[in-house]
Image (cartoon, rainbow, N blue to C red):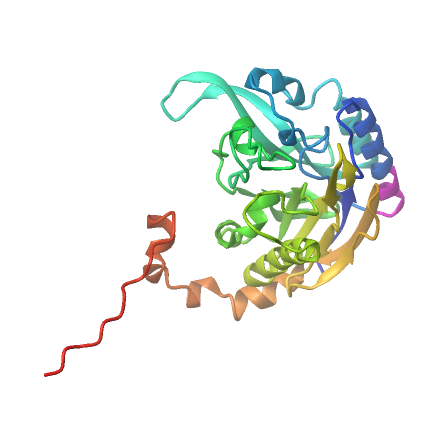
Amino acid sequence: MSRIVTVAAAQLGPIQKAEPRSIAVARMIRLLEQAHRRGVELVVFPELALTTFFPRHYHQDIAEADSWFEPAMPSNETAPLFEAARRYGIGFHLGFAEIAHEADETGVVRKRRFNTAILVGPRGDVLLKYRKVHLPGHAEYDPKRTVQHLEKRYFEVGNLGFPVIRAPMGSLDGINMGMMICNDRRWPEAWRVLGLQSVELVALGYNTPSHNTEAGGFEAPHLRVFHSHLSIQAGCYQNACFAVATAKAGTEDGCELAGHSIIVNPQGEIIAMAATWDDELITADCNLDLCTLGRTTVFAFDRHRRPEAYGRIVEQVGSVPPETWKKPDAR
C-alpha cells in the first residue's frame, strides 16, 4: 500500500507592520479550515508568519525589536491556531521569531534571538524545532539600500543543525521530516545534510523580495522566482525528497514579496504552485514511495558518495583563487 500524505502550502498575503498577531492567526485558521475541507494532513506556513518581515525595519537598540519575537510557543496569541489544528487533526509548520534564554557557546545563559520554525503534530505536540542557519543581509543600517535586510542584526546563527524526525502525520505512522528557512534553500549543503538522514519531506517557509535590494549589481525580477524554484527543485531531486515551500506574497510595508509558493516531488518537478499574491492554499498528494527511486539508484549515497574528496566543503568558508598555471621550463 502506497504511503501517501496530503500536504498544503498555506501562502500568506502581506502582513503590514501595524497589524497585530491576532489578524495573522485568524487568517491562518481560515486556511486550516480550507485545508480540512480538502482532506489535508499537513499545512506549511511561511517564515516569520505572525508579523511583517520586521528585519527590513532598523532599531538602533536591538531590544526595541523584542516585540516582534515570541518568548514561548504556543503563546496566548497563537493558542487558537494550535486549537484549530487539534480540532481538525492537521499537523502544521510555523515560522516565527524566537527569544530563548539559554546558554551560548561559552556557557553563559543570556537572551538569544533566532529565526525559528517548528513542526507540530496533529495532536498539538511540537515534534521538531529548527533555527535558521544561513542568515542573509547585514547587521548595520545601510544607507545605500532602498530596503534594509537586517537579519544579521536581529538573529543569531541557528544552533540546532539540520535535524530530521520520524513521526506520525496524517494516516501514516512515520514520515521522515525536516525543515529549512528561506535562504537555507539556496545552499546545497543544507539539503544534503537532510538527505543523509533519509528525509522524505522538507517543510520550508520564506519571505523573498521580488527585487534584490542589495547594492551589489542587477538581478532581473523574473530571475528571483526562477532561482528560488531552481534551488528547491535541485534540492529535492538530488536528495530524493518532497518539499513544501511556502512564501509570503504581495506588497508588505511598501516592499514587494515574490510569492510563488510551490510543492515539489523527488524528481524535481513542481506539482503545485500558487497563482496569486494573496492568502492561498495549494495542495498535493505526496506518495512517499517515490523517494525510493532516487535514493537507490543515482543518489544511492552508500554506494556513490566520496566524502574523502569533499574536505574543502567543511574546511574552508570563503572561496580562494586557484594556482596560476605556468608553462613548464623547456628541458
Which of the 4 image quarters holds residue 322? bottom left
Residue range in magenta is 33-39
Taking the view exactly as shown, the residue that stands out farthest to the front is 144
**Position of residue 276 measured from the top left corner of the image (x, y, whole percent):** 84, 49
Which of the 4 image quarters holds residue 180? top right
Secondary structure, magenta segment, majority class: helix
**Position of residue 167 measured from the top left corner of the image (x, y, whole percent):** 63, 42
Identified at 58% across, 57% down, the residue is 235
* Quadrant, the C terminus: bottom left
Question: Along the horizontal axis of the image, is 102 left or right of 145?
Answer: left
Is 132 in the magenta?
no
Q: Nearer the viewer, residue 69 or 271?
A: 69
Q: Nearer the viewer, residue 93 or 247?
A: 247
Residue 1 makes an appearance in the image: no
Taking the view exactly as shown, the residue that stands out farthest to the bottom is 331
Question: Along the horizontal axis of the image, is 94 left or right of 315?
Answer: right
195 versus 145 height, above or below: below
Numbered marks: total: 0
Which of the 4 image quarters holds residue 269? bottom right
103 versus 42 height, above or below: above
Q: Nearer the viewer, residue 245 or 327?
A: 327
**Position of residue 192 measured from the top left corner of the image (x, y, whole percent):** 50, 54
Taking the view exactly as shown, the residue that stands out farthest to the right is 37
Question: Along the horizontal axis of the image, is 116 left or right of 257?
Answer: left
144 versus 244 height, above or below: above
Residue 82 makes an appearance in the image: yes
* Quadrant, the N terminus: bottom right
Identified at 34% across, 49% down, the residue is 316
